[in-house]
Amino acid sequence: MLKLQDVFRKVIEFLEKYKFEYLIIGGVAASVLGEPRATGDIDISLSIRKNKIKDFLKYAEKEGFRFNSKEVDKRVKETGTFKIWYDDVHIDFIIVSTGFEKSAFKRKQKLSFLGLQANFPSPEDLILLKIIPGRPLDIRDAENIAIRHKNELDEEYLLSWAEKLSDEAEDMRIYNEIKRLLKL
């Protein structure tokens, strides 16, 4: 059984080798930009056209990753997400589809994690990515990132996107949560 850090290294080397546009998100990113915490998988935002997924999978298989092609096709069509495995660790991919996600890619930063340079979102973008689903663990992650980067956050950027995302969702929860986090 491989450790998560071994799989992280393998997936980053794969994405870099084939020049796929990606951002590390989820628990790994929350640990790097906020407070370290346990996670059992790797979440990656992937900027790819849906008609290029088959090429992505062909390269992934060549590098030793496993997946169920029918399940990938179904999930890409239904949810814009898919999953692959390396050893017993799964990697969740979320295909970039919104204006906000595209903006996050423009602001990406190379950070070192486990001795490897990888693409991570800005603290502001990861806060927003964590606030959108609103799960308790994601809210804690967003709080930790906000506290760690307190005097460095681009508040105007955060509030502007929070307002847009709240308007799109017809729910002020995201905007109100960002306002609360900025007071921490």
Image: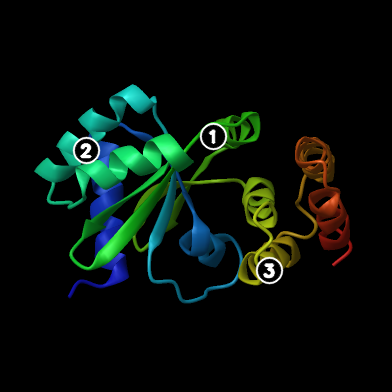
Q: Which residue is drawn at 65% across and 51% down?
A: 123
Mark toward the start of the polypeptide (2 vs 1) = 2
Q: Which residue is drawn at 10% across and 42% down?
A: 62
Distance from the alpha carbon under mark 2 to that under mark 1: 22 Å
Name the one closer to the observer, 114 or 37.
Answer: 37
Residue 152 at x, y percent in the picture: 75, 52
Mark toward the start of the polypeptide (1 vs 3) = 1
Question: Which circle, 2 or 1, is nearer the viewer?
Answer: 2
Which residue is disc 1 drawn over?
105
The image quadrant of residue 17 is top left
Q: Do the residues labelled 2 and 1 touch (CB within 8 Å)?
A: no
Q: Where is 36 relative to 8, above or below? A: below
Crowd band around label 1 with a 10 angstrom C-alpha radius: few (<14), some (14–19), many (20+): many
Mark toward the start of the polypeptide (3 vs 2) = 2
Question: Which numbered tag is attached to residue 144?
Answer: 3
Q: Which residue is drawn at 30% across and 49% down?
A: 12
